[in-house]
Every structure is written in C-alpha cells, then in structure tokens.
Image: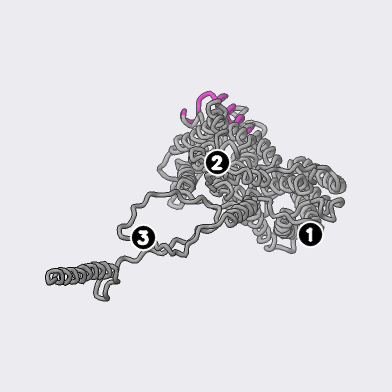
Amino acid sequence: MVKNHSEMDNSNNEVPHNNVKLLAYQRANTKEATPPLATEEPPPTPPPPLPPPPLSLCPPPRPTETRPLTNTSLPEDSSHEEPSENATLNTKSNDDTLLVKDSTRPKPVRGTTHLISGLYAKLLVAATAILVTIEVLPNSVPLFFYHGYLFTFLIGAAILCILCIYMSLVLQKCPGLEELEELDQSTPENESVLRRKAYSVPEISIFFRVGALVFGLGTLIAIGLETATLFTMEKPCVDKLNFIQPIIHALFTFMQMHFLSLNSQKAIQNLGWCRHIVLMHLVATNIAVWLRLIVWETAKSWLDEIHTNINSTDRFPPDGINMTAHALFSDGRHEVYVSSSCVWLEQEQKVEDILALRQCYQNTTMGIIWDKAQPFIIPFIVQYCLIGAAVNYILWESFNHRRRRITRRSNSWSPRRQELESVVTQKQTRKVDCKGSSKGLFLGLLVLAVGIVVLILFFVLTNNQNLKEETLFIMITVHCAILGLSFLGIFLGICRVSCMCTDYSRRQNLHIVLQNIGVFAVYVHGICSLVVGATHISNPRFLAVFVDGALMIIQSLAQSIFFHKVGQKCCSAKCKHEGSRPGRQIVTFLAFTNLVLWITESFTDHNHVSSQLQLQFFGLIPWGLISRLLLPLVMFYRFHSSVYLMETWKSGYSMES
C-alpha cells in the first residue's frame, strides 16, 4: 500500500510538470506574436494601393517586369477594389463617346525630325539670300561664283525628293505590300499603318490646283525662252554648270506641277519620317528661286540707272563716226571713251561683267524676245513659287498634328469602335447647283468686260508719249472704282451671311497662311501710295494715288472680315434659309472683282507708267526693290481671294443629297 501511494504521488507530480512545459511553449509562441517594443525597429510599411487609371484615349503603357520586394506585401484589407462589369461597360461607352467628340480635333505632336527639317529649310533660305546678293555686289567675288553649285544642289535635290515620292507610290502598289493593309490593325506590327492614316492633312482646292497649273505653264514658257536663247547663241555666255540650270529648273517645275495636281496628301504619307525633310527642301527651293529672281531684277534696275542705252531705229552712230564721251574729273584728269553702241563712264568690274552678260544674252533674236517678255512672265514665276512653297509648307505643318482617335493603341479593335470611326470619317455626298448666283454672275461678267477693255486701252495708249498721264489717270480711276464696288459688295455680304448656319468643322490652314501674307503686302503697298499721294494732295494725279491706296487698305481689311464670317457658315436642310442661299450673289460678284483686279494688276503694275509718282518719290532702285517684293504678293492675294470665293461658292452653299 505504501508503494501504491508513492506511485500515485509520482504520477501526480508528473502531470503538473507536463502542464508547465505546455504553458512555457504557449508563452514562447505568444512572445513571438507580440508586437515589437518601441525601441525595436518597425517593419517596412507596405506601399499604398495604386489609384485606378484615368479615363483617356491615350494608349495604355506596356507592362514591365518588376522584381518583388522582400518582406513587403500588400495588406489584405486594401481599399482598392476591382471595377465591376457595369463600370467596365460604362467606361467603354464613355470612351466611345469621347472618341466621337475628339475625332476631328488634331493633337499636336512635336518631333525632333520635324524641328530639324524646319531649321534645315531656314539655313538654305538664309544661305541663298546671302550668296546670291554677294555675287551682284561690287566685291572680289566673281559673277556666278556660287550660283551654279548652289542651285544645282537645291533643284537637283528637289528633283530627287519628288522622285522618292513617286517611288513610294509605286512601292505601295506592289502586290507584296498590299497585304500589309489587310492585316489586323490591333497588332503592334501594324501600328505604323494605323499611325500613317492618323494625320490631319488639309485638302487642296481644285481651283487652287488649276491655278498652280496655269502659273506653272507660264513658268515653263519663261524657262523655254531662256533655254532657246542659250542654244541659239554662237558661244555660251556662262560655264557648263550654269548652262544646264534652265534645263533642270524646267524639269523641277514640271514635276512639281504634277505633284501638286496629284493627291499630294496621301502621296507624301508613304515616306515616313523622311517626309519632313522632303517637304521643307521643296519649300526652301521655291523660296530660293524667288529670291534669285528678286536680286537679279533689282540688279537690272540698278544697271538701267547707271547705264543708258541709245535706242534708235537706225544704226547710231553711222559708219566712220565714233561716239566719244569726255570725262573731266575733279583732279584735272581727262579721259575719253569711244563706243558705237552706248556712252558710259568708267564702271567697276562687277558692273562691266553684268553688262557684258546682258549684252551676250541679247545678241540673238530669241534673247531679245525673252528680254521683252520678262515683265509679263515674271509674275507667273513668282506666283508659282509662292503656291509651291505654301502648299508644301501646309503639308509639312499638318504632319505635326495627329487625330486622337487614331493614336490610341488598343489590344482589341472592336466592331463598335470601327463603326464609330466610320461614322466620323465618312464624307457625305453634297449637291452643288447654281441657284442664287445669276445676278452676281452677270454683274461680275460686266466688271470683267470693263477691265479687259481698259487693259487693252492701256497697252495701246502707253506707246503715245503725249497720253501717258491720261492713261495713268484712267487706270487709277478704274482701279478705284472696282475697289469701291468690291467694298460695297463685302459690306452687303457680311450682313447677308450672318443668318446662315454655323459650321466650325471647316479647316482653313492653307487659306489663313496665304491670306496673312497677301494682306500684309497689300497694307505695305497701300501705305506707300498714301505717303506718295499725301505729298501733293491738291494735285488730281496725287489725289487719285492717295484714294487708290486708301481703298486698297479698306477693301482688304473688310474682305478679311468677310472671309472670316463666310468661312464659318454653311447651308443645311435644317436651316430656315435653305431655299434663299443668302449671300451667294455677293460671293459670285466678289469672285469676279478679285479676278479682274488680279488680271489688271498682273499686266499693268510692272509697267513704269502705272507707278511714275512712286518712282519719282522713292527713286528707281528703292521702288524697284519694293515693287518686286510686294507686287507679286499683291497679285497672288487677288488670285487667292478669287479662288477662295469660288471654293466657298461651291462648298459653302452645297446641300446634302
């Protein structure tokens, strides 16, 4: 019994010992789970949950691989919740709505290639202006020292640029490359195809293209006369590199005419990033040709002032008689110069070189014809250069903007999105008729007939020395009358088009650029006329010049306001004026008045008879430089205004069929 009691006591003692061990184990586990004390370092805090991505049409960023952070985990009770299915549907619906709203709004995209191409064109224009001017100034640089190399590079590279455009069109039509257009546009490989269609490229008016063809034809005629002159000379007047300049210039003119008449918007898109440099080189080439023409025409005016040719129907002096010019200088030195064609004092070597070159070109019959025709064909060359430079510049600028609906990258090209884009981009068929333009048409034809009659009288009466002043007064009076009628028509047109429907979707980038250039030229020319006329305003001739300059400024200012108004208006079946076509009579009449102004100014403003007072006030060389800079721009402003009004007559008053 004693033994049993002792065994029981031992068993009872073992149970508490086991309980102590279990309690110690639980305390140890509890100690590990207890939070650290304030003296210990806390564990790193987890990063906050990412906010939901904002609703945007921009492409989502590509996923990148990230390494997991050690000892860091997101809390399970994060406030970030996954979007529900309804929220996803609403997001898609809102995205489609924003797609329709932003589909016609261009988004600027600044690229390095775009910037470099602009700087490259500025460098070419600056170098051309400096080098061409240095050649004709009295210095040690010989005549045509830079000309051949400079314009061979400019025009030759421009020809290569247009050839690259043609090659890209040919390659696009290859069977192997046509399959690229049929691939799924959602894949990243076809992203370039999608982006190529994303640019907001303006359309060029058909009337503007016809004008480019007309001016290009006049340029080809001028170059043809120059080429015929070179090939009919007994010996060449220039070296071989300058001898081929008219040939490559004619080739460039013809190729650019074809490029402008094509769908140049789509043709240039196939070049990729090269299109920026190609377009800006074409812009620089056109401006360089214009600058060369200005410098050489100014040099001719300079020669006319320092050198007087003896014009006569008979040979003077007769055979056996020498014409002498005696020069007595201030230091008592006496020199005698003998010539059978002209009388001159000793000139610098550069002047003698230019005189010799001019005389060499006029040794043949074709050279004389070319020299006589230059005042009539030079405006065509200048206006063709302006059209080429303006169109290429607008194309270059348009490739700096993309449409937001195309720049979105989506992994799934849904039928809903494709349907929305087709609704945005589809072109509605519009019907064009001549309703509401008969009165303006016949009044415009009457003004055109009067302008042609006065133009014929101008060319007939200018040969009579006794009627030059009367001819000048008649021309200025008719010009003022046409400007006055145009201003009255513009005032009525502004009142009439105010009731039309508003349409802000019409893009007019090309029109705005050309309008700003032309209006500036008209302002400068009009202010010059105001200054000249104000010197002797009591004289009827000076008064006519003053009134003409004032009307030029007022008419161009009012016409700019009218263009701004009518450019935002359109005809629609929903408007109450659908049957009346308000303002269309005025638009037709103004198109004819600007056409008459363009014809008269193109064939009369280059003549010294029409600017006698300006020549007397400013001098031959200053006014020659001003007129050669401004008058082509003024003429081009008249032509562009007529083209814009014709385009407004066609598109602004057309109805949906």
Please tell me whether the stretch drawn in magenta is mainly helix, strand or loop: helix
Label 1 crowd (10 A; few <14 / some 14-19 / many >=20): some
Answer with mark 3 or mark 2, whichever residue precedes in sequence: 3
- Whether residue 148 is situated above or below residue 41 in the rendered picture: above
Label 2 crowd (10 A; few <14 / some 14-19 / many >=20): some
The mark found on residue 194 in the picture is 2
Looking at the rendered image, the disc whose residue lies closer to the viewer, 3 or 2, is 3
The mark found on residue 498 in the picture is 1
**Which amino acid, by three-letter code, is at mark 2?**
Leu
Q: Is residue 553 among the parts visible in the rendering?
A: yes
SS for dot 2: helix
Answer with mark 3 or mark 1, whichever residue precedes in sequence: 3
Residue 292: image x %, image y %? 53, 42
- Whether residue 636 is situated above or below residue 54 in the rendered picture: above
Report how many numbered discs are placed on residues in the image: 3
- Which quarter of the image is occupied by the N terminus? bottom left
**Which amino acid, by three-letter code, is at mark 1?**
Ser
Q: Which segment is the magenta one?
A: 221-240
